Amino acid sequence: MNRHHGLFRRLLRLFPADFRGDFGDEMADTFEAHRRDALSRGGAMAAARLWWDTVTGILRTAPREHWDLVRQDARYALRSLRRSPAFALATTAALAIGIGANTAVFSIVNAVLLTAVPFHDPARLVLLYERVPEAPSPFDFSAPDYEIARRAARSFEGMAAYRNAVYELSGIAQPERIPAARVSPGLFGVLGVAPAIGRALTEEDDRQNAHVAVLSHHLWSRLFGRDPSIVGRTVTLDRQPYTVVGVMPAGIDFPERGPETNHEPADVFVPIAFTPFERQGFGGMYNNTVVARLKPGVDVEGARAEMRTLARTIGDQYPPALAAIARELDLPLVPLTDAIVGPSRRLLLVLSGVVAVVLLIGCADVANLLLTRTAARQRELAVRSALGAAPARVVRQLLTEGAVLASAGGIAGLLLSLAATRAIVAAAGDALPRSGTIGLDARVAIFTAALSLATALVFGVVPALQSVLGSSLDALREGGRGASAGRARHRLLGLIVAGQFALALVLSVGAGLLVRSFVRLASTSPGFRPDQVAHVTTTLPAGRYTTGRQVKSFFEEAVAMARQAPGVSSAGAGNDLPLNVLERRTYSPDPSAVQLPPLERMTAATWTAGSYFEALGIPLRRGRYFTDADGASAQKVVIINEQLALRLWPHDDPVGHQIKWGLESAPSPWLTIVGVVGDAKQGPLGTATIAQAYVPFLQLSDAAAADTITGLFRTVELVARSGGPAAVVLGGLRAGLRRMDPALPVTKAEALTDMVADSVRPQRFSMTLVGLFAAVALGLAALGIYGVLASAVGQQTREIGVRLALGAPPAAIVWTVLKRALALMAAGVAIGIPCALALTRVMAGLLYEVSPQDFATFAGSAVVLAALALAASLVPAWRATRVDPLTALRAE
Amino acid sequence: MARRDRDPLSLLPLTPAMFHVLVALADGESHGYAIMKEVEALTGGGVRLSTGTLYGIVKRLLAEGLIRESPSREGEDSRRRRYELTPFGREVARAEAARLEHTLALARRKNLFRRA
């Protein structure tokens, strides 16, 4: 045999083994004859041409032969599955759940983590923040700092500022509050987004503080039916006319959710138009998020280096009184994508892991079912091998059956995932950024297809191995009851079930930790009593409430109205409520207090009207609450929380002492402390409580109350405590507000308990999701142990019959079955606990006051698992005691 | 496994290569290389089957019962299997030829050949 022959033989390997077996020798022979012929007639050229034809011919025909075989196997598999519908249904369901869960989570991961944000070259977009060392987190830019940065920074192509606002949109059927953004004119250019129709905001708009607006595509579709003639028309925002100049393109949500501030996708964009007061406002009003585009060739580190220098430049411009802050100023910078997806990355990674485990458990179920079925089919397979099917051919057949099952599971899973994705996105609410883009796309479809194929390999390979390892000849000889093969199979089955339990334990520990963490979080006292409190929010538009006097009257009248509402025992209003206090102020205490450096003298501040504390149930510790006597002309007073009291007068009664806003040199009036109240949380339940001061709304200066830059005092949070359910009072409050100003939309009307529940929504979301998946995983694991025990009992019918015939009590038989279940469970726990210990560490960031190694959770999960194993083994155990000795023996 | 109960028309149209292999076997049994040469000769070098293509076709024709392996002769190399048409295969080949003829006649009626 020559070189050519060897080469041709190697080419033949491209054909399926069967085909090669049938025709290989003959083909080699034919090729050789052909080659010799060609050589003698046409020489080397002809031989080379023959080679070319032969190689291309084989490359064309070999795939077709493989495909033929696959079709043949698939037909065979479908036929044999149709004969056992229960098996087909169980496997498809287990796979559909696993694949469906994975597809759903991947759809989210795909949209949130893997798909770029929809701006031009988003990798070059960064968010800039300001920071001083003592502050708990970076904060946004003040107008003067932004202006300096924009002029001086060399690392960026462009820089723009924006901040969220809320406007009342009227002149439409039903006035409503819509999320808005005040943006600097460069924003659209920096993002690389051009309006779909009309134009973007210009420098000229900004200079003139022009009343012009760009609408979001969403608002344009929802309220204006995508009418292109909207450009040039007027809409009414906060009772002032604005000319629509453009509409954003579809699919652009800006600001994106994810960053801590200014993260509400806006429906309308208006010029930010900083006022002269803002431009001079060094050291305050840090409320503008700054986005910038890196110049080509400048990386994030390079820009960071420049920002460190720039921080000095900005600090030098601060007035001398603020030198302490100015010296410490830093300008951190975060890639935009990180800011958007960073907060949800950990949860999504944990979820991906969780659903992967669910799928593995489902695969193990299917492998078990297949294994049991293969055992039953041992004879059929043995006959096939005896008839000359190569072992590889039998393995191929089993893998094809697996692929058929996986395809069915994959299709069902894809359908399941559509519903699951929708449910998850709905449950997430604002907890997920970019949720509008979550859905089925080509990448998700490819993922599901690949996953289905991979699962076919995972669970199909087990019975395939078994069929090769377990001697097929034995099976044929012993009439399919090979005792040794049976034992080997049961060892394998047992191993798989123990593995399932280990995986299920990992998941239930994970879920258990989240549940415990959530329970702890939800039982954290917010510092006020939300039961039986109704809460209504509205915002006073600048176009109608122009003076401070009008704003303050509204607060007064709203409280008076609420007090009159039926069922209300106490009512008050504030510019914000606990769990969402955003305002932070520097203060100075009188000399009797502990003297703190200026940077540590920062307090949360709320302005209240009426019986704010009584209505919220914030307890009084010393002194008194505000009364209606604390009016505009009365002595300026303040109430502080326990934290602030403890910091300033740790050994003394603070009542009667004084503090004022700003540094010592500030010209603001002294406020006399009249009371100390309990600490109410300023942020979500999981966050720490900080120092806080409360001031009567009516003692606010008219100028401050009328301010439209921050709109700080234009939000009215009305709270009313009643003797019954909050819902009863809500109607009265709504109607009362409507009487005061019929055009004023009510943004929120809810029981205060709902607001508290909302503040733990992200945590509830992760707990629910992981808990749900863990429950599914436990169910699938229980199915696995049930299947194995049922098959074992079936296998041992004869042995059980003999034992019963010999007088063994049923309890002993039950114990035999339970013993097996417990052994499997114990093995599962033994493997699972170290795995769980290793894996739950990832979850540390998702837990609140619960250690990832929490003993109670681990023990509890093991107990749940044991109970489940016992429950799953009851039916097989009961069935074992029902074995009729005579029938069992006669069956032989 | 000749399937006499089947309608020859159910297999039409055949691929040109399949048809040529059947035609090459019309005069009697032949082995692989001879079939290839015969096809090439019959078509004046127009159709040249590669080894892979030929045996793909042989496999399919065997499976459909259009050809079968001829009984091996005394002292012959067992690798040189020879194939012959089954009666069913002959029917199918005839039916395909008739189909082609009919198609040709249609083309002729349509003045396809007379146009300058």
Image (tube, rainbow, N blue to C red):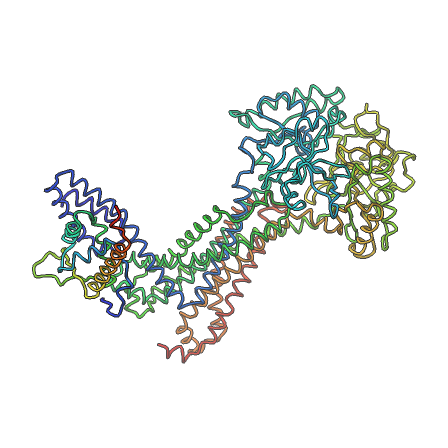
- Picture coordinates of residue A566 (x, y %)? 86, 55
- Picture coordinates of residue A312 (x, y %)? 65, 20
Say which of A135 and A249 sits in front: A249
Residue at x 36%, y 57% (from the top left corner) = A400
- On the rendered structure, is A820 left or right of A53? right
> How many numbered marks appear?
0
- Picture coordinates of residue A695 (x, y %)? 83, 37
**Residue A502 appears in view:** no
Say which of A708 and B40 sits in front: B40
- On the rendered structure, is A763 left or right of A209? left
Dividing the picture into quadrants, the one containing residue A771 is bottom right
**Residue A184 appears in view:** yes
- On the rendered structure, is B110 left or right of B26? right
Looking at the rendering, in which quadrant would you find the C terminus of chain A?
bottom left
Relative to A64, residue A160 above or below: above
Relative to A760, residue A780 above or below: below
